[in-house]
Amino acid sequence: MAAKEIGKISHYFDKISVAVIDLKGTLKAGDKITIGDGEDAFEQKVSSMQVEHKKIASAKKGDSVGLKVDKPVKVNWKVCK
């Protein structure tokens, strides 16, 4: 199954390793996602997400969520599921 783009990185807080993702699709805790473009891309499991500092279990299209990431990311990188 081909990975479906579900959002883009809009901000990255390097001190706390948190990326902000503007969603074009749904995202749930436990989902496996791929972040990045080309050779820099990496896979990780969504362990927890936040919207305005509140922990959430799922998010939908149009939401912007904060997500702890395993590696540094860049703005405009794609997020696929």
Image (spheres, rainbow, N blue to C red):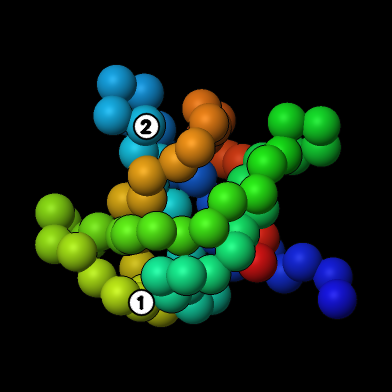
Task: Tell me the kind of residue under disc 1.
Answer: Ser
The residue that appears at 37% across and 32% down in the rendered structure is 17
Q: Position of residue 29 (x, y in %)?
A: 41, 70
What residue does disc 2 label?
17
The residue most toward the top is: 15
Q: Position of residue 31 (x, y in %)?
A: 53, 70
The residue that appears at 25% across and 59% down in the rendered structure is 50
- SS at mark 2? loop
Task: Tell me the kind of residue under disc 2.
Answer: Ser
- SS at mark 1? strand
The residue that appears at 58% across and 51% down in the rendered structure is 44
Q: Is residue 4 left or right of residue 50?
A: right
Q: Position of residue 43 (x, y in %)?
A: 65, 49
Q: Which circle marks residue 58 in the picture? A: 1
Q: Is residue 43 visible?
A: yes
Q: Is residue 62 visible?
A: no
Q: Is residue 42 left or right of residue 57?
A: right
The residue that appears at 53% across and 58% down in the rendered structure is 45
**Up/down of 43 relative to 33, above or below:** above
Q: Position of residue 24 (x, y in %)?
A: 53, 70
- Identify the image quadrant of the N terminus: bottom right
**Up/down of 37 relative to 29, above or below:** above
